[in-house]
Image: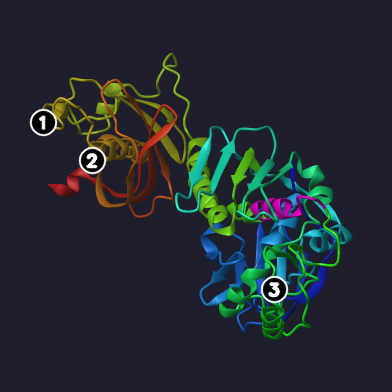
Amino acid sequence: MLQKTIKNKVSLNGIGLHTGKNVTMTFLPAPENHGIKFQRIDTPEGVIIPADITRVVSTNRGTAISSGAIVINTVEHALSALAGLGIDNVLIEIDGPEVPILDGSAIPFVNAIETAGVVEQTEEKDYFIVTEPISFKDEVTGSEMLALPADEFEVTALIDFGSPVLGQQFAKLETLDKYKEEIAPCRTFVFLHELEKLLEQDLIKGGDLDNAIVIADRVMSQTELDVLSKKLGKPSIKVEKEGVLNTINLHFKNEPARHKLLDVIGDLSLLGKPIKGKIVATKPGHSINIEFTKVLRKVALEQKKLKGKPIYDVDKEPILDTNQIMGMLPHRFPFLLVDKIIEMEENHVVGIKNISFTEPCFQGHFPGNPVFPAVLQIEALAQTGGILCLSKMPDPENWDTYFIKIGYAKFKQKVTPGDTLILKMELLEPIRRGICRMQGTAYVGNKIVSEADMTAQIVNRTTLK
C-alpha cells in the first residue's frame, strides 16, 4: 500500500470545546514520510508539533500535544478522520490552541478531506504489524487494551459507565472502508452531572447541545439546571426524565460506544504509523489509549531493530574464520570473543560468538546459574566492529582499535550457555582521523539481548612503542 496525502488545501473554522476560542485550521498536502504535523501559525516562531505519542502532555477530556509551552488541545477527532481515510502525510496549520469541536464528531473533517481530494504517493506505507498479543490494563479503572494479530486494522470497543441510562455498549469496526459511514458521524458525549465539575476545571467553554450528546442520568431540580445554564452561558432547560437531552436523535443506538472507538483510532494514530492488527478496547478513554500507544511504540521500536537482524546460515562458509580473525586482532583465548565473521560490507559487519558452558567467566559469574556477562557482550561487539575498522587499513595486522566511549548501553535479555550471539556493528558515520563511531546490536534468535553506541580510535601499534 502506498502512502497518501491530500490533493489541495482545505480549511475549517469553529470553536474549541474546552478553550471556547474561535480557530481556523487548514489541511495542506505534505511529501512522503512527512507524517501528520500541526503548525501553530499564531505564534511568532510558527511552531511545528508532530502528531507523535512523545508529544502528548494531557489526556484530560481530550488529547493534547505540545512543543515546549506551545500546546494544541483536542487533536483526537481530526487525527481519527485522517487515520480513517488512510492519510499518512499532512501539515495542519492552526491559528489557536485547540482543534475546533464542530459537531463533536469526525465527519466534518472527513468531508473536508474528501473535498480536498486524496492522492497516492510513491513511497510504501510503513505499517506496525501486530505479530503477537500485546496488552495493557489499568488496575485502578479496570480499563484494558489488547492488540491481536490480524490481516488489517480493526477495532472493537466496549463501554460501561455504570449508568442505567447508557448501559453497557459494544461497537465494532471491521475495516477502515466502513469508517466514514459507521464511525465518523458519532459525536462526543457527556453526563449532565459532569458539566459543573468540568466548568470548575476551566473546561468546556465552547460546549453546546449542538456539539455533544448530553445524557441526563438523574433528574436535576430546576434550580440546579438554572445555575448550570447560567455558568454555561446558555438558555435554561428542563429535565423531566432521564435520557438524552438533545432534541436531535442519535445516529446509532450505540453512538457513545462508536464515539469511544473513534477516539481510540485518533489516539492510536499518535504511534506515527498505520496498524495491521485487531484492537480490543474495554472501557477505553484518552488516558489508557495513550498509555497503550506508548506500549505499542516500544514494540514498534523493537520491530524496527529486528528488521535489520542478520540471517545466520550455519552451512554457509564464513567470510573470516577464527584463524583469520586472529590474524587481524591481537586477542587470544580466553579473550577472543568472535568465532567467525559472516557478513562484511562497506558500513556494517556481522560476527558470531557461540556461548559454551566452558567459558572461563562462568567459574565465578553466577556459579550454578551461568549468565554470560553483559560487559563481555559489549566486548564481543567491539571486537566485531574492530574487524570492520581494521579491514579498511592496508596492513590491518599493524593496527589496533581502542575504546574511547560507550553510550546508550542496554541489556534486555540474559545470555546463557547454548546461546549463539549474532553480533552486528554498523558505522554511524564515516571514519575520520582514525575515529570510528558504531551502533552495536547483539541478538539471540529473534530477540535483541544488548545494544550500545561505541566509539573507538584506530591506532598504529608502532606509535605505542
Residue visible at 33% across and 45% down? 410
Q: Which residue is mark 1?
A: 364
Circle 3: is it few (<14), some (14-19), or many (20+) Cα within 10 Å? many
Q: CA distance from mark 3 to mark 1?
A: 64 Å
Q: Which circle's residue, 3 or 1, is located before the other in the chain?
A: 3
The answer to whether residue 460 is left or right of residue 464 is: right
Q: Which residue is mark 3?
A: 17
Q: Amino acid at mark 3?
A: Leu
Q: Are marks 3 and 1 in contact (CB under 8 Å)?
A: no
Instruction: Reply above or below: 185 against 296.
Output: below
Provide the major secondary structure of the magenta segment.
Answer: helix
Instruction: Reply above or below: 390 against 445.
Output: below
Q: Residue 66, image x and y in percent? A: 56, 70
Q: Amino acid at mark 1?
A: Gly
Range drawn in magenta: 252-265
**Label 3: element kind:** loop
Q: Which circle's residue, 1 or 2, is located before the other in the chain?
A: 1
Q: Which residue is mark 2?
A: 375
Residue visible at 37% across and 42% down? 440
Which numbered dot is residue 122? none
Q: CA distance from mark 1 to mark 2?
A: 14 Å
Q: Residue 203, image x and y in percent? A: 62, 76
